[in-house]
Structure formats: C-alpha cells, structure tokens
Image (cartoon, grey):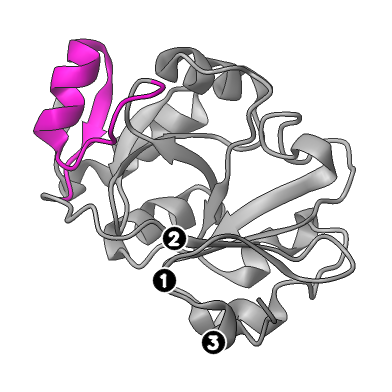
Amino acid sequence: MPIVSAAYLTEVATHILMGGVIAIPTDTVYGLAALATSAEAMVGLADLKGREQQQPIAVLVDSVEAVAPYLEDAHALDGVAPFWPGALTVVVRAKRMEGGLAAPAVTEGGTIGVRIPDDDLARRLIRALGGVLAVSSANHHGEAPALSAAEVARMFGDELLILDGGDRTGGVPSTVVDLSGERPKVLREGPVTAAMLGIES
C-alpha cells in the first residue's frame, strides 16, 4: 500500500475502521496504529511488530474526555491534563466493560496507558476515529523506531499503508507515570519530571 498525505485522512481512517493497521506520525516517532476496540486489530498490530500478544499497547487520545468512559475513575487523568498534549504517558485503572477497549492488548492487568500526542495530524486522525487509537512504535520488535515514512516503508514493505507527516526528530521518549496504585510512581523518566508532576522520587 502507498505512502499517502494528509489529504487522504478519510481513507486512512476508513482503513483502520475496517480492522487495518497503518503507520502514522506522532510527535516523537512513527507508530503502528489500530482500532483500540478491536481484538483482531490488536492481534494484527502485534503480529506485524513480532511481539508477544500479552504486551500492553498504549492508546493515544485527542482529549481526556474521549478516554474517560473507558476508565474506572472518569477523573483519573484530570491532574495530568495540563501536561497534554505532550510527552507524558499515564497508566490508570481501566473499566471492565463489554464493547470497551480490546483486552488484554490495551488493558493488560486492568490498567491502560494514555497519552495525547503533540502532533496535529495524529490528533486529527484520532478524532476522526472517535478519540482513541491504539499505537505502538513503528518497528520490528527490538529494533529502533522509524523516524520517517520512507523508513517505515523500508521496514515493512508495500503491504502497510503509511500516513506521511514528515520526518520526526526521535526526541526523548515520553515520561511514563503509573497512577493506578496507592501512590504515583514514575516508570520512565522523560521530559516531564517527577517534580513537575508533584511526585516524590
């Protein structure tokens, strides 16, 4: 499948809604994206990367409100909202529900990782798909993520539809903080520090 521009956003969204996996730009690297409510799509994404099905995949959202229905506590993300869009991934408790997000790929262990990317094209696509999209870095398991549409094509060949958003910088990976337990815990240091979040290190 071809590398396409933002002019084909509707066609890209339709491909995802039909259960397809595509490559999209985020604010740091390119990612492999699939419908977060489809277990089959999550299997396809994991197979494409060559990773275990049990490894959780975070969701990118266009707003806190979009993901709130899938959370055990609808207000769990209120305190971190000022840091979005940006390089902060937050792990919170997920609501167990029929017709919700695909488990275990998205809600492994009853939790979900959430981020709002600082990329307008990515957020436009996410918005077109209802505000929530499962995304994992565009690379085969154990390799470095792709930083351009051309790199994605070299990795995965002609079978993957790629939304071209220009070259990515790679940057520093997002901070990952776990808010699912009794006390907040920083799982990975990144641009948003524990001090900024008011978390004792």
Label 3 element class = helix
Question: What type is the residue that disc 1 sits on?
Answer: Gly
Q: Are marks 1 and 2 in contact (CB under 8 Å)?
A: yes
Secondary-structure class at tag 1: loop
Q: In which quadrant of the rendered image does the C terminus lie?
A: bottom right
From the viewer's perspective, is residue 111 above or below residue 109? below
Q: Quote the CA–CA distance across marks 1 and 3.
A: 13 Å
Q: Nearer the viewer, residue 54 or 156?
A: 54
Tell me residue 50's x, y (percent). 45, 13
Amino acid type, residue under disc 2 in the picture: Ser
| Mark identifier at residue 196 | 3
Left or right, 117 with reference to 83 = left
What stretch of residues is rendered in magenta? 141-165
Quarter of the image holding residue 121? bottom left
Q: Residues within 10 Å of mark 1 (few under 14, many from 20)?
A: some
State yes or no: residue 115 in magenta. no
Lower position in the chain sequence, tag 1 or tag 2: 1
Amino acid type, label 3: Met
* Residue 26 horizontal/vertical position (percent): 32, 53
Query: Which sits in the foreground, 126 or 83?
Result: 83
Residue 102 visible, this angle: yes
Q: Residue drawn 69% across and 23% down?
A: 54
Q: Which residue is mark 1?
A: 86
Q: Is residue 128 above or below residue 77?
A: above
The residue at the point 76 percent across, 30 percent down is 103
Give the label on residue 174, or none: 2
